[in-house]
Image (cartoon, rainbow, N blue to C red):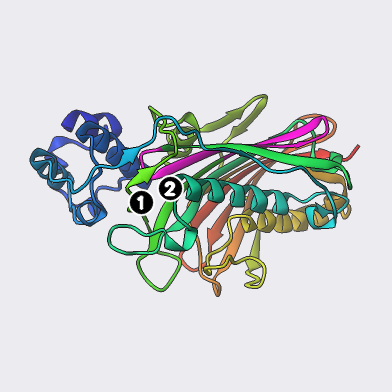
Amino acid sequence: MRNIVQRILPDIKEEHFDSEFKNLAIDSIDLVSLRVEIENRLGKMIPNRDWLSFKNLNDIFAFCEKENSEKEIKFSEKTTVKTEKNRNYITMPQMCLEALSENWLFKESGDLHWDLLCKGLETSSSELKDDLGNRLYATFVRIRIDGNHNLSDFKENNPYEFDAELSRFGLGMFFSKINFKSLEKNIKMDMMTSFSIRKSTTNKHLTKSQPNIENCKIPQNPEFPDFGNEYRLIKKEEQKTLNHRDYIFNISDNQMFTREYSLNPYYDLNGVGLLYFAAYPVISDFCELQYFHGLGKTDWAENYFTIFRDVMYYANCDANDKIVYVLNSVEDISENRVKIQAMLYRKSDNKMMARIFTVKQKKH
């Protein structure tokens, strides 16, 4: 078990194994990876009541030596969770500014991911709880969309369909690959989620947990997927660039422009009062628009549309909080494409909520 710790947490020295987790600055994704690796070694699930009781790494080692796990989960090796929705047509609810609505695409794809997850765990969303009885909330960690056309190329009344598949890493991280197709055009989406519980009445203290289940039909990834590992490295500031295809972002905290945003609770919040994952790019676009309006580009929204977006989520906020948008960089990468990097912060405590990497293309 110590070898696992040293591989996943190389900066934690043995003399700190008895230090409390709150004093070690261990990233939450690293803790999820550590738990999965240890459970795989044990061949059993560590109950949440035990995992949440661990104060330090030595507590984990002591638990493992006793192999005091309460139950073993039966994982299906034959069932692949895959679905294809019936063909539909792009109409006004799916559109914005005479283009495919990115907000609708996020919501629909997120709902598909969530539906696959619940089917794979054989439970409804409202019944998802950990073994302490806490209600679990799906927390989006990272979403990337990458199209062979920008959103304005998807036209009204064109047919569309989704296909998707879901996999997992342990019971703490879930990954979907979704393809949105309309005629010869498509948008590929990668999604990564975890589960969280509320530890207080606010949205500022969400703690990762995992479901209390006995059967799981979601196939397991043998290793932590690159999509998740890249998120982890960027969050820890160990990776300084984001590379995808021919898009290269040099990650920056530069402040070219800032804008304060007040939440609209009737639109920005989801059904359980959390800031909706689909609202993050909309908030970013609204504030970005103010920057370009200041440059005299008043037709920015009608002329430039997303062809690539990568949102890395770090935190949520309360309905009465404000969000501070920070524009880090704007760079022309061709005659008709612009690369934009931004961050969202929670005003109340200056907590970073997300990094957002975007490429927009001029309408044809």
Residue for point 49% across, 69% down:
348
Is residue 178 highlighted in magenta? yes
Please state if 31 lies on the left or on the right of 226 as rendered. left
Is residue 177 visible to us here? no
Residue 121: give its label.
2
Q: Nearer the viewer, mark 1 or mark 2?
A: 2
Where is 74 relative to 136, above or below? Answer: above
Residue beneath label 1, please? 210
Which part of the image, by quadrant, shows the N terminus?
top left
Q: Main secondary structure of the magenta part?
A: strand
Distance, label 1 to label 2, CA atoms, is 11 Å
Please identify the residue farthest to the top as the structure is shown. Answer: 246
Secondary structure of residue under mark 1: loop
- Residue 345 falls in image quadrant: bottom right
Q: Which x, y percent locates residue 180?
A: 71, 38
Q: Could you tell me which secondary element the residue under label 2 belongs to?
A: helix
Residue 259 x, y percent position in the rendering: 66, 61
Q: Of marks 1 and 2, which one's residue comes earlier in the chain?
A: 2
Q: Choose between 315 and 49: the one closer to the eye.
A: 49
Q: Does 212 appear above or below 262?
A: above
- What is the quadrant of residue 149 in the picture? top right
What are the residue bounds of the magenta stretch? Answer: 169-190
Seen in the picture, residue 189 relative to 136 is either above or below; the reply is: above
